[in-house]
Image (cartoon, rainbow, N blue to C red):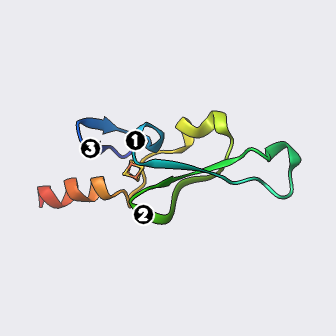
Amino acid sequence: MSNIANVGDLSISTCIECPAHTIESDPDPYDDFCDDDIKIGCKFKKDCYSTTGCRPYNAKKESSVPDWCPFIMKVENAIK
Ligand code: SF4
């Protein structure tokens, strides 16, 4: 089961759909064919990534909302 984050009016299942996502270069040093790999981070969590070493065309498939997403935690806390 994948996580869902409620960010403003958006209900999303991947970080790439979220306005808070960041994209950084993450090339594979041992594979020239993966020079353009990326990692997808979050403006709210320093040094946390929903995916690393990701082929750009797989960004949506590999960036499921992580358990540490601050917007999931808020929803969970609100239910308690
Ligand atoms: S972790 Fe949550 S807030 Fe951060 S980019 Fe992903 S969905 Fe958005």
Residue drawn at point x = 22 percent, y = 57 percent: 74
Q: Amino acid at mark 3?
A: Asn
Q: Is residue 70 left or right of residue 20?
A: left
Location of residue 20 with respect to 78 vertically, above or below: above
Asked whether mark 2 lies closer than 8 Å to ligand 1, one says: yes
Asked whether mark 3 lies closer than 8 Å to ligand 1, one says: no
Foreground label between 3 and 1? 1
Residue drawn at point x = 85 percent, y = 42 percent: 33
Q: Earlier in the sequence, mark 1 or mark 2?
A: 1
Gap between marks 1 and 2, in whole Å?
A: 14 Å
Q: Which residue is mark 2?
A: 45
Q: Amino acid at mark 1?
A: Cys
Q: Residue 14 appears in which quarter of the rendering? A: top left
Q: 33 or 62: nearer the eye?
A: 33
Q: Earlier in the sequence, mark 3 or mark 2?
A: 3
Location of residue 20 with respect to 43 vertically, above or below: above
- Secondary-structure class at tag 1: loop
Q: Amino acid at mark 2?
A: Lys
Q: 33 or 79: nearer the eye?
A: 33
On the image, the x and y values in percent for residue 67 come to: 38, 58
Q: Which residue is mark 3?
A: 6
Report the quarter where the N terminus lies.
Answer: top left
Q: Is residue 48 left or right of residue 76?
A: right
Asked whether mark 1 lies closer than 8 Å to ligand 1, one says: yes
Q: Is residue 30 left or right of residue 15?
A: right
Report the quarter where the C terminus lies.
Answer: bottom left
Q: Which residue is mark 1?
A: 18
Decide: marks 3, 2 in contact (CB < 8 A)? no
